[in-house]
Amino acid sequence: MAQTWRMEIATGKGAAIQTAIAHATGDVMVIQDADLEYDPEDLPSLLRPIVEGRADAVFGSRFLAGPHRVLYFWHRVGNGLLTLLSDMLTDLNLKYDLGPGVSLTSITSYVHRDVLVVRDATALTGSVTGGSIGLSESLYTLDAPLNDATTSNVWTQELRLAGGSGRLKWLVGGFYGRSKRHYAQSLLVQRFDTAAAAELTAKGSPTPPGWTKGTLGARVNELFFSDLHNDLKQAAAFGEATLTVTDRLNLTAGLRYYHFTEDRSLVFDGIFAVPTNATGTTNANGVAPRFIVDSNVNNDKYEEKLCNE
């Protein structure tokens, strides 16, 4: 039985869909424009992956193979660019049909991690403050939490253009990735600085309050401090072609150019560290060819020979 809900105020298609979802009672919902821009005869094909248990959601496309209405060129280009931008923002892997035998695949990935691990370093700290420095039990038993903090952001984008006809298939593409990682450690022992300064002074080693403060970032009472940064940038361009010589023999030849640069910086500070402030850069590039021979010797045996230089 069909039911209709009318919107008192025209708030757009998105609001209409939200209202429909709120009233839906079935197992599957199909969004259909009233002007029949989408052909209802396509619904069985759209629903089949869900009915067969192969998908939770199915999105149609104006660009896939099969009969479809004429599309204006710039409409097609605009739709493709908007879809590509959406893929990049939502971390998706989608394929675009650009015409007979040619397709463009976009693979986008973004990962963010922010991890804090706190360890009890009281025993390890006490072995230095009590053993090496010779401070009293009231000092070498102070709580000494060691904080390990890691933050990383990794973004990659790959585009592949593939096509071919007959016995020849080809693929060209490019890849770019950037990984930024920050790792830091902090050993902050509250009340250590002032009490240790007084005890060391009383033992004949004049020590002013604030003596634990470093010159490269360590705060007062921060006995160990580290700050490490890595910034890795990678880029590559590649291409290959596969020739089907016979029904049982395929030959593939390809070439890949790669380049990467990694910038690093590290800082160590505190009375438990040798003060260090260093930076460095590593980079490399090169060309890597590859050749593959696929041979189906018989129906029961398959052989593959791969050669990478």
Image (cartoon, grey):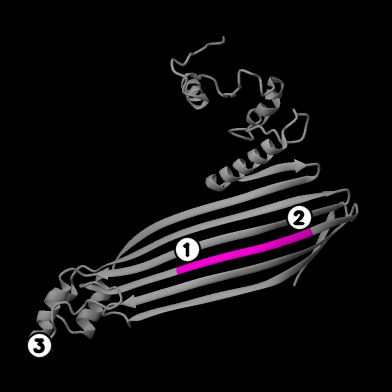
How far apart are the alpha carbons under marks 2 and 1? 30 Å
- Does the stretch in magenta take in 234? yes
Residue assigned mark 3 = 203
Task: Report the Cα–Cα distance between label 3 and label 2.
Answer: 76 Å
Residue type, mark 1 in image: Lys
- Quadrant of the image occupied by residue 214: bottom left
Mark 3 residue type: Lys
Q: Residues within 10 Å of mark 3 (few under 14, many from 20)?
A: few
Q: Quadrant of the N terminus?
A: top right
Instruction: Look at the image and give the residue range highlighted in magenta.
Output: 230-240
Q: Specify the label residue 24 is tagged with.
A: none
**Which one is in front in this view, the residue at disc 3 or the one at disc 1?**
1
Disc 3 to disc 1, C-alpha distance = 47 Å
Whether 23 is drawn above or below 253: the answer is above
Rendered location of residue 220, percent (x, y): 20, 73
Q: Earlier in the sequence, mark 2 or mark 1?
A: 2
256 with respect to 251 (left or right): left
Name the spot of residue 291 as percent of width and height, x first. Answer: 80, 66
Local secondary structure at mark 2 = strand
- All told, the count of numbered labels is 3
Q: Earlier in the sequence, mark 3 or mark 2?
A: 2
Give the crowd class for mark 2: few <14, some 14-19, many >=20 residues within 10 Å: some
Residue 279 percent coordinates (x, y)? 44, 77
Residue drawn at 36 percent across, 68 percent down: 184
Residue at x 12%, y 87% (from the top left corner): 206
Residue topped by disc 2: 171
Residue at figure coordinates x 68%, y 73% from the top left: 286
User: Residue 298's spot in the image, x, y percent?
Assistant: 89, 54
Callout 1 secondary element: strand
Outermost residue toward the bottom in this view: 204
Q: Which residue is mark 1?
A: 180
Q: Earlier in the sequence, mark 3 or mark 1?
A: 1
